[in-house]
Amino acid sequence: AFEKLERVLSIRLHELGPRDPDVAFSYAALGQMHAARGDPDEGLRLLDKAYGIHFTLGDFAEASQVLMQMADVHRKHGEPDSCLHDLRKALAIQREHLGDTHPLVPATMVQIGRVFEDNNSIAKASRIYGQALGLIKASSPAGHMNPAFAMALLSSASALEQSGNIDLAIERVTE
């Protein structure tokens, strides 16, 4: 699989040049594969190339998603500070260029909450889950339950329950 992806990347670089979105997608796919196969440094290097291309092209949604992929590599390798750095950078890009109503914003906030939760910062996790819920509610049509809302709601309730705020957890789920 590596050889095939490397061949695709080589062809795309030759045919499209180094600043094409398809080249960035190839770098990202190869980076994820390296990280999954135990070479996180090479994976992060390739993901960073993908991020740079997307950001330079002004494709801020894709750039922020690559940052989220980089954060996931850091999280899986026990690097919560680097993970949070990448997630916060993604969130800043999303808010500045896509706006708070874009679905990536609350999804990224939920990921930040999970890192806090992983590190027993339940109060911080609960706070950011609540902010994500607020954004999702504000941007969703009345009576519409989207998957991001459900994910944020369950994460929020779980964090509240862990911190002993069972009444607030129940209130949040039933409102």
Image (cartoon, rainbow, N blue to C red):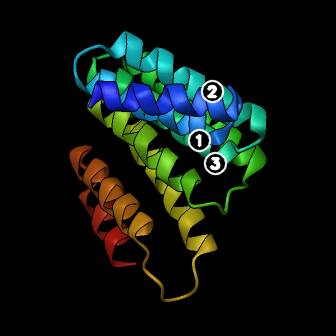
Residue drawn at x 45%, y 38% is 112
Circle 2/circle 1 CB separation < 8 Å:
no
Q: Which residue is mark 1?
A: 22
Please, what secondary structure does the residue beneath circle 3 have? helix
Of the image marks 1 and 3, the number of the one nearer the N terminus = 1
Which numbered circle lies on residue 88?
A: none
CA separation in Å, label 1 and label 3: 15 Å
What separation in Å lies between label 2 and label 1 (alpha carbons)? Answer: 12 Å
Q: Which residue is mark 2?
A: 14
Which image quadrant for residue 146?
A: bottom left
Residue 108: percent from the left, percent from the top? 50, 45
Identified at 32% across, 25% down, the residue is 3
- In the picture, measured across the screen, residue 165 lies left or right of residue 123, that is left
Residue 174 or residue 46, whichever sits in front: 46
* Residue picked out by circle 3: 61
Q: Is residue 140 above or below residue 116?
A: below
Residue placed at 52% from the left, 35% from the top? Answer: 66
